[in-house]
Image: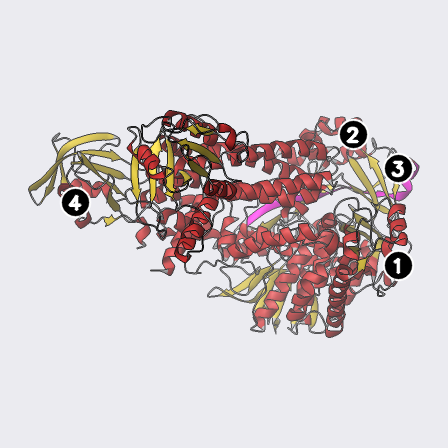
Amino acid sequence: MIKEYDTIAAIATSVSNAGIGKIRVSGSDAIRILDEIFEPYTPRYGNGYWPSHKVYFGNVVDEGEIIDECIVLVMKAPNSYTREDVVEFDCHGGVHVVYQVLSLILRHGARAAEPGEFTKRGFLNGRIDLSQAEAVMQLIESKNEASRQNSIRQIKGNIAEKIRPVREQILYEIAHIESALDDPEHISLDGYGDHLLALVQDWIDQVEKMLSTYDDGRFITEGIRTCIVGKPNAGKSSFLNVLLGEERAIVTEVAGTTRDTLEESVTIDGITLNIIDTAGIRDTEDTVEKIGVERARKEIEHADLVLFLIDMADGIQEEDIHIFKEIKDKKKIILLNKMDIGETFSMESLKDYVEDDTPCITISAKYRQGIDLFTKELKKMMFHGTIDEKQDFYLTNARHKNALEETLGSLRMVRGSIIDQMPEDFFTIDLMNAYEMLGSILGEAVGEDLIEEIFSKFCTGK
Amino acid sequence: MKNVEEYYDIVVVGAGHAGCEAALAAARLGCETILFTISMNSVAMMPCNPNIGGSSKGHLVREIDALGGEMGKNIDKTYIQSRMLNRSKGPAVHSLRAQADKDAYSTTMRYTLQNTDHLTLRQAEVTELMVEDGVITGVKTYSGAVYHAKAVVLATGTYLKARCLYGDVVNYTGPNGLQAANGLSQSLRDHGVELYRFKTGTPARIDKRSVDFSVMEEQTGDEKIVPFSFTNKEEDIRREQISCWLTYTNEKTHDIIRANLDRSPLYSGMIEGTGPRYCPSIEDKVVRFSDKNRHQLFIEPEGEYTNEMYVGGMSSSLPEDVQYAMYRTVKGLENVKIIRNAYAIEYDCINPNQLKSTLEFKNISGLFSGGQFNGSSGYEEAAAQGLIAGVNAALQCLGREQIILDRSQAYIGVLIDDLVTKENHEPYRMMTSRAEYRLLLRQDNADMRLTEIGHQIGLIDEDRYDKFIKKKQQITEEIERLKRCNIGANKAVQELLENNGSTPLKTSATLADLLRRPELDYAKLAPIDPDRPQLDDEVIEQVTIDLKYEGYISRQLKQVEQFKKQENRLIPEDIRYEDIKNLRIEAVQKLNQIRPHSIGQASRISGVSPSDLSVLVVYLHQMKYR
């Protein structure tokens, strides 16, 4: 028997001393196992009689010994997450009890589920499409509210909702061209180029719009890669501490990467910043320092956003000018620190170095002033003023992005062919490609490697 | 009484377009072959339209020729008019079509058969298959004679339990009043073969002297003729051509048809068989395209030495009196005399899903089949399958590996894959739209695609092969030369460009760059390309297409790469679909019926959904690591 279709079980909640711990069991033996280990308080249930979509209350029993008092949910195939018979045990929390119940279930013939296996079955059994399955994975990993909401919308199928109509229209046009090739007497292609051109343009607009949400989407799910720069003592560390200490901020330590720099993740007002504190940048002869400077340059290059701290008390120094050069083409916010002692600072002195639309905010890290202005500017800059959690669609998956980019490329080729007045049968080559690419997002034409890869990323229990 | 008993390598049943190709291929590969026909007068008969080729069918004929088949050569010898269709469209849909002298076509083919070594022609009706333990051992005829064979190719066309109908008249005959074959169907059933009942139809033949051509549009042949066979040059086959004539039905015609629909056996329910949607009778057209107030009709000669003409576009099974009435409403046919009535024909054929991609039956080893017997329609489709069935029967006999053409190699590959994989409930007709990679599968490059394979099989001789290699080399060299050859923006060049409505050069460009411009072609560049070698038109054509459409071709090649990946992902022959629990029952049934050899083929089975395919892919993946 192939392991794919036996009965699987896993703890579905996080393994901690939480209030409850949920164990999910899926497969054709789920009901039998329930029968063997669970004694409901209501005597008319049990012995194979478990009506679907009901909640049962009773004891999990191992050879006469009560292990835990549980609430049990039964969802029979096909109306379950996996489209198989699913039984969920809500145990009392506590790592030990949950593990005891799980090991009992495993002894009765279930197998510990692999990461992503429940969702994989949902996909394989046709309950969800691939983009939905991927969204489940993102949901589990979501760092903030916007990301969570976006994943939920994707699970409901909103990527599919955007893509399917375009895909169907493309197929319709392919079919039209081909039937005209085969039956020129009855189906005419006179003036068809103009008709198709308008459609193709519309599809291009739609795909471009979807693609344009990608950066926002990535910022939402992964956070904004943020680099803090400034000469030593400009207040980088204290500013970082202010952010980290903000009441509304949620701080996560990101464990040591290959970099020496410590990366901190902080979420302010729903925006997640992944902050990298860099060494200062200056021309130096010192070899050790040179390495640090090189590294800082790299960090800046990869950053989505640069925060540049300037010491107002010192005014613009040589080193600052140097930094200005380095970050010339980046998205940036200039933070003028030490407003409390920097009365002498002249805003005019900035004029030579920053573009008119670069935001410059005066703050005091020490007295926690100007932070509100900073977060407001952050939203304006990265999310066009606001993160719209209700926005129906953010593209967040790199695979989807690549497929959409390829779709876009093919559609532009079609547009080119029409404008060049190529014969109609040339249009279908690139139309077909666009059609296939959109299909790959929905998992309607995916290879085995992709399926395996996607599901290996899932965490257990989902 | 003692029955005749003979021994052959290969028996071919039926000498239509499929049977002729099968028998010739087998005999040419050295197998002792006997070809049975119900009548020696109906060898390679064209019982319907008097032409070979046309949209996508022309591609098939050129592919048959590139593989070493006979159809292309035979039509080149017997054509009376030739045209390249769709010249205004892209090169992928250019299609060659020739009007045939029907009698000449038939007798010329018969002559070729009769003069081929290892080949015996025999007039007899095969009524029984001999099968032992799932292996074919020979056939029996109506007279009781036994012919032992290592392989049998069935190509019975429309003759099995055939009956012809118009109005309430039924003739229990094959086409043209020829004797039907009534015995074999039962024998097939006895051996577990599933049969379908299909129908097709043909229009009336009319007397040329009763037609007023002065009110019709004349359709002449091309001035410059492209032969079907790659072995022929234009000058080898040039001849005076005979015209066809275009006219139209009108509302009066349609009124008569509508008023008499209830008298058509098609609509009265007398015909059980399913007809071809893509080659509809005039009744079907009037019903289905009710918004059209006219349909094209082509009045085509049936041959050089006959007054019979074919009314293309107006096949019918309406009663005789209605036929007279409706034909006489057509402009130019007001006083028409009918020589042969239009009729529908019903016949037994098989569900081709029972065949492997080699055209061998899955459950009877050594039994192959081709042509309308496999549920297709058309002479060219038949010949293509006949060739492959004959080749594979012979290769099996010789203990050699059989051939399968895939969808990216040939229209023949598309045709056979569709037949053996997809659900098909009507006579299957080849169409351009069925080929996914049609820019690569052009009629002009059929030799480039398939001569190599024909040579490997053994149907292309060394002389022809050497010529092919030379042509291929010339094409490559010329493309390289044009890509290398830089042209400066000098006065002569600018003038030439201007004279051809082309933008002058700003900097230098290669000859290839110039050739890619839509308004320019190879001939126009001659004055600024003094060093060009002397090349045949066929070579220049390939060079031009390869360069002009390079981008499209390379993108299509990428698609083929993807396709090949799926085709090369093989499914073990002993797979048990019942064991794959998450497959839907419908998918299990379909997969068991077709037994696809690859994931690619599985993906084309109707009734197997993308999620079924995912299940299958994951299952195979896990089997690897079990």
Callout 1 amino acid: Arg
- Neighbour class for label 4 at 10 Å: few (<14), some, many (≥20)? some
| Mark 1 or 2: the one toward you | 1
- A2 vs A123: above or below: below
B522 displayed left or right of B202: right
Element carrying mark 2: helix
| Mark 4 or 3: the one toward you | 4
Q: Quadrant of the N terminus of chain A?
A: bottom left
Q: Earlier in the sequence, mark 2 or mark 3?
A: 3
For the magenta stretch, what is the residue range?
A: B195-214
Mark 3 lies on residue: B216
- Neighbour class for label 2 at 10 Å: few (<14), some, many (≥20)? many
Of all chains, the one bearing label 1 is B
Query: Magenta span has B208?
Result: yes
Residue at (73%, 48%) from the top-left corner?
B93
Q: Are dots 2 and 3 in contact, CB under 8 Å?
A: no
